[in-house]
Image: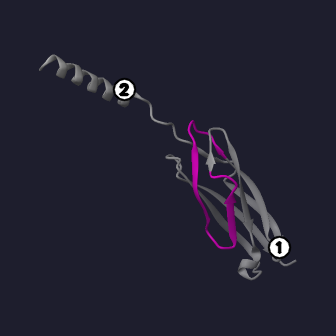
Amino acid sequence: MKPDARIIMSLLVLAMLAVACTPGEQPGRIELDKIEFDFGAIPNTTPVSQAFQVRNTGEGALEITGVSTSCGCTTARVDRTRLEPGEVTTLTVTYDPQAHGGETGRFTRVVYVRSDDPRTPEASLTVRVTVIDP
């Protein structure tokens, strides 16, 4: 091998080692302040809402990619979808008893919060409510 080729090969090997040894970006980690909540007894005429906290406990940014619920009677939304390490956003969950025509009884619903957290791509919050006649 010519001396120029050795230098070029050495530089290529060093460049590949530098890339391989560079730590990748650390992931964000999703944490809900509650994983279960009971609205208690509510009249079958009025929606109820509750705010929860979603925190990024990881070392990198966390991207919330979606929020859904197990039933149309329950809605959920987050205030912000990108959280830097240590940041918190609000998750607001609303249960509307009128979605079931005012039916009474005990109901359990689930809120799903999807993110780019590799350990917990989908965090869940279970909510319960007892709907009664006013």
Q: Relative to the observer, which residue lies in front, 23 or 74?
A: 23
| Label 1 – label 2 distance at C-alpha | 61 Å
Q: Quadrant of the C terminus?
A: bottom right
Instruction: Check disc 1: other Cα within 10 Å, few if <14, some if 14-19, many if 20+.
Output: few
Image position of 111 with respect to 53: above or below: below
Specify how the rendered protein is coloured: one colour
Which residue: 53% across, 47% down?
117
Disc 1 secondary structure class: loop
Q: Is residue 60 magenta?
A: yes
The tag earlier along the polypeptide, 1 or 2, is 2
Part of the protein shown in magenta = 55-81
| Residue 60 spot, x, y in % from top left | 56, 38
- Determine which residue is flagged by label 1: 46
Q: Relative to the observer, which residue lies in front, 20 or 12?
A: 12
Q: Residue furthest left?
A: 1
Q: Give residue 18's mark.
A: 2
Q: Residue furthest top?
A: 3
Single out the mark in the foreground, 1 or 2: 2
Residue type beneath disc 2: Ala
Instruction: Check disc 2: other Cα within 10 Å, few if <14, some if 14-19, many if 20+.
Output: few
Residue type beneath disc 1: Thr
